[in-house]
Image: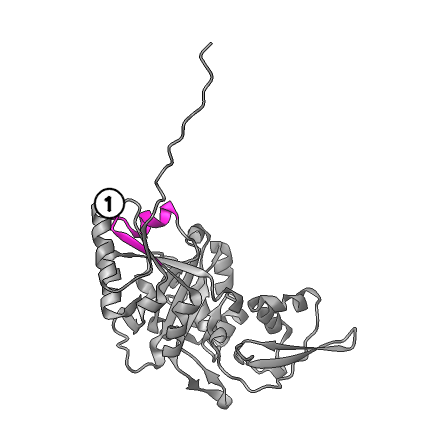
């Protein structure tokens, strides 16, 4: 079992009792001076502590454990219970071939994504109360890749496999994120606390343009996110999307190359090493792919040494029905 990173004590002033909970999070701020608003945000992030918000406990937190980074610290809008959930991504067959040959997964900068609203913070200007303006420069050091909780849909095949040559791969959040998290390593930061400032995975939140705009104009909320020394807050800004895209049901990998000297930040792509034979659990070819092409691609895939399930999607296959009818009168 993963060890907790922080233990806090909450006192209920009405019942005069103490509630001791161990949280999987990095010390994002001085817990001794934590405001109620920040405590409520913490409860929202860690859903199993939402009972404190509902019962309106007033927090007087005390740190009683040394902070230690775990993979759970870099989950965004996900819980550790979701680590073994299946996720899916559609590639072209050429991209799948490249992944197995190179044993690398490719991430791209968010500016390459189709939705212009993806870069709403990257393109924004920060302004302090005294009028001083800053640009959000480190946003351009992030790279990402999109996956989905949705097993299959007509829309996903048509959007991501327009030439009918696509292939859908299945893995779990844990299998995908473990090598990615280890890539980030451990970075010693303030007060000896350990932070992985590079590797994140999370679930996208879909909201209306009105709500997204309200978040942008909330000074306290944006300050908490952008100046969070653990990196979680800044990374979390990539996990908001407009309601119109909710059918994507997205999970995202994000990598911040700002502190990685091996990365060329002028490049729009970033590749990291994986073992696809371990990470990928299943391969499903486009249901519209010609049968002869499917059989050929299946043989090629097997020739790589991939011996797990390989099938063609049966999304459009219809069972024949015999309609039982009454005689004409």
Residue at 55% across, 68% down: 45
Instruction: State the residue in front, 84 or 265.
Output: 84
Drawn side of residue 212 relative to residue 106, left or right:
right
Q: Residue at x 41, y 73 (%)?
A: 178
The answer to which of 300 and 104 lies nearer the viewer is: 300
Asked if the stretch drawn in magenta spans residue 192, the answer is no
In the figure, 318 relative to 27: above or below?
above
Residue 142 x, y percent position in the rendering:
35, 71
Residue at coordinates 61% horizontally, 67% vertically from top-left? 48
- Residue 64: x and y in percent read 62, 86
Residue extent of the magenta highlight: 153-169
Q: Could you say which quadrant of the image residue 282 lies in?
A: bottom left
Q: Is residue 70 above or below residue 251?
A: below
- Classify residue 239 as left or right of residue 98: right
Quarter location, residue 90: bottom left
Q: Is residue 235 visible?
A: yes
Can residue 125 be spotted in the picture? Answer: no
Indicate the position of residue 129 as horizontal and vertical percent values: 51, 75
Badge 1 local density, few (<14 within 10 Å), some, or many (20+)?
A: few
> In screen coordinates, is 243 left or right of 42?
left
Q: What's the coloring here?
A: one colour
- Using the image as rendered, state which of residue 179 and residue 326 is in the foreground: 326
Q: Secondary structure at mark 1?
A: helix
Q: Residue furthest top?
A: 329
In the picture of the structure, the residue carrying the numbered disc 1 is 291
Q: Position of residue 263 (x, y in %)?
A: 28, 78
Position above or below: 281 against 9: above
């Amino acid at each position: 079992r993963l060890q907790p990173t922080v233990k806090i004590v909450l006192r209920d002033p009405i019942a005069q009792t103490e509630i001791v909970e161990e949280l999987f999070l990095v010390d994002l701020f001085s817990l001794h001076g934590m405001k109620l608003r920040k405590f409520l945000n913490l409860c929202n992030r860690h859903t199993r502590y939402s009972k404190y918000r509902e019962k309106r406990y007033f927090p007087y937190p005390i740190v009683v454990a040394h902070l230690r980074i775990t993979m759970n610290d870099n989950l965004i809008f996900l819980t550790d219970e979701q680590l073994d959930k299946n996720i899916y991504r559609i590639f072209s067959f050429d991209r799948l071939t490249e992944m197995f040959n190179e044993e690398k997964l490719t991430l791209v900068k968010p500016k390459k994504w189709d939705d212009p609203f993806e870069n709403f913070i990257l393109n924004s200007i920060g302004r302090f109360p005294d009028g001083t303006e800053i640009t959000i420069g480190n946003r351009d050091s992030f790279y990402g890749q999109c996956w989905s909780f949705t097993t299959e849909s007509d829309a996903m095949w048509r959007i991501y496999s327009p030439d009918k040559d696509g292939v859908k791969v299945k893995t779990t959040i844990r299998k995908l994120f473990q090598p990615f998290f280890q890539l980030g390593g451990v970075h010693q930061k303030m007060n000896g606390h350990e932070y992985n400032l590079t590797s994140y995975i999370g679930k996208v939140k879909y909201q209306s343009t009105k709500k997204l705009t309200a978040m942008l104009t909330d000074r306290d909320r944006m300050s908490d996110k952008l100046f969070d020394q653990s990196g979680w807050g800044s990374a979390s800004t990539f996990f908001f999307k407009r309601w119109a895209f909710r059918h994507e049901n997205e999970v995202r990998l994000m990598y911040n190359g700002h502190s990685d000297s091996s990365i060329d930040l002028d490049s729009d792509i970033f590749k990291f090493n994986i073992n696809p034979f371990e990470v990928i659990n299943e391969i499903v070819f486009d249901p519209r792919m010609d049968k002869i092409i499917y059989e050929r691609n299946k043989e090629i895939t097997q020739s790589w040494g991939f011996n797990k399930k390989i099938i063609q999607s049966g999304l459009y296959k219809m069972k024949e029905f015999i309609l039982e009818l009454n005689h004409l009168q």
